[in-house]
Image: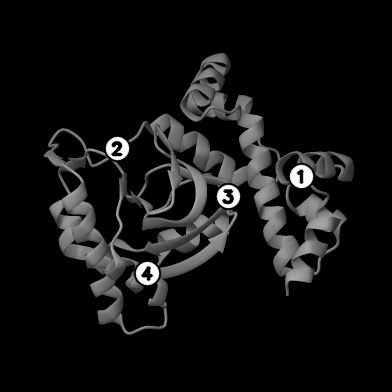
Amino acid sequence: MNLYQQEHSVFEEHFVVERKKNFSFPLHLHRSYEFLYILDGQMEVRIDDEVKIMKKNDCAFIFPHQIHSLQSEKSEHILFIFSPEHIKHFSKYIENKKASSNFFSVEDETLLNVLLTLDKQDNIYKIKGALYLICGIYKEKCVFLDNNEKKLFSHGRLLRDIISYAEENYKSDCSLMELSTRLSYDYAYISKYFRRKTGINFNTFVNQLRINEACFMLSETSNSILDIASECGYESLRSFSRNFLKFKGCSPTNYRKQLNELE
């Protein structure tokens, strides 16, 4: 999880293109932009306080440092993740503006062809041309209003602090009680605040982070199930297996087996 956030937060001229099916990712934030296009099926997308069920031809334009999550059991999508340095003119334009929504729909064969053919190995001019095409379409679909009082899509510092704490500590002891003491907030208040803002409790969020990391390790390493459970913050294999089944609908062993069968 930290790898995901850091990867999309550190590097200038950063660009990633992904085409995936049935993809989910818990709440997170980073300094990059994201553009999401649904090719088929549907996906529940949360951006700050707005939640939308996205369907075919729906798009989402996510700004740097916006808190967002993706949840889908049956969908196919294209996702671009790119640093602000790629679209400096657009970033400057929206510096003191607020967009009416992150979501829009478009049926444009030219755009779809660009999305389907663009590759991160393409030359920088082709990449930036495609990204500015996306920005241009989004600007036409969305209303931007002057917003001099606060930065675009600024979000409560408390929620960012809670999410950052969880992402930094989910592999070890991760206690909302400890965080509430550190931030000088009442535990009951901070617990209710997080649930109100996200729709889930803090422990569920921490387990989402742990299981998401476990899925990555099951896919990309040959580590044993026991080692993965320990590295993801679980003190017992039983607790790990129970939570894995809850979030993924199968055991860690079967999950890895299914991945191997796809190769």
Q: Amino acid at mark 3?
A: Ser
Residue 81 lies, with reference to residue 213, above or below; the image says below
Q: Name the secondary structure under disc 4.
A: helix
Whole-angstrom CA distance, mark 2 to mark 1, is: 36 Å
Pointers 2 and 3 in contact (C-beta within 8 Å): no
Q: Which mark is residue 154?
A: 2
* Mark before the other along the chain sequence, 2 or 3: 3
Q: Looking at the image, is mark 2 or mark 3 nearer the viewer?
A: 3
* Mark before the other along the chain sequence, 3 or 4: 3
Q: Is residue 259 visible?
A: yes
Q: Quadrant of residue 125?
A: bottom left
Which residue is rendered at x = 40% and y = 56% of the image? 36
Residue 29 lies, with reference to residue 198, above or below; the image says below
Q: Name the secondary structure under disc 2.
A: loop
Pointers 3 and 4 in contact (C-beta within 8 Å): no
Residue placed most toward the observer, 262 or 11? 262
Q: Amino acid at mark 2?
A: Ser
Q: Amino acid at mark 1?
A: Gly
User: At which x and y percent is residue 28?
Assistant: 49, 46
Pointers 2 and 1 in contact (C-beta within 8 Å): no
Which residue is rendered at x = 44% and y = 69% of the image? 17
Name the residue carrying label 3: 24
Q: Which mark is residue 115?
A: 4
Q: Amino acid at mark 4?
A: Leu
Q: Is residue 259 left or right of residue 165?
A: right
* Mark before the other along the chain sequence, 1 or 3: 3
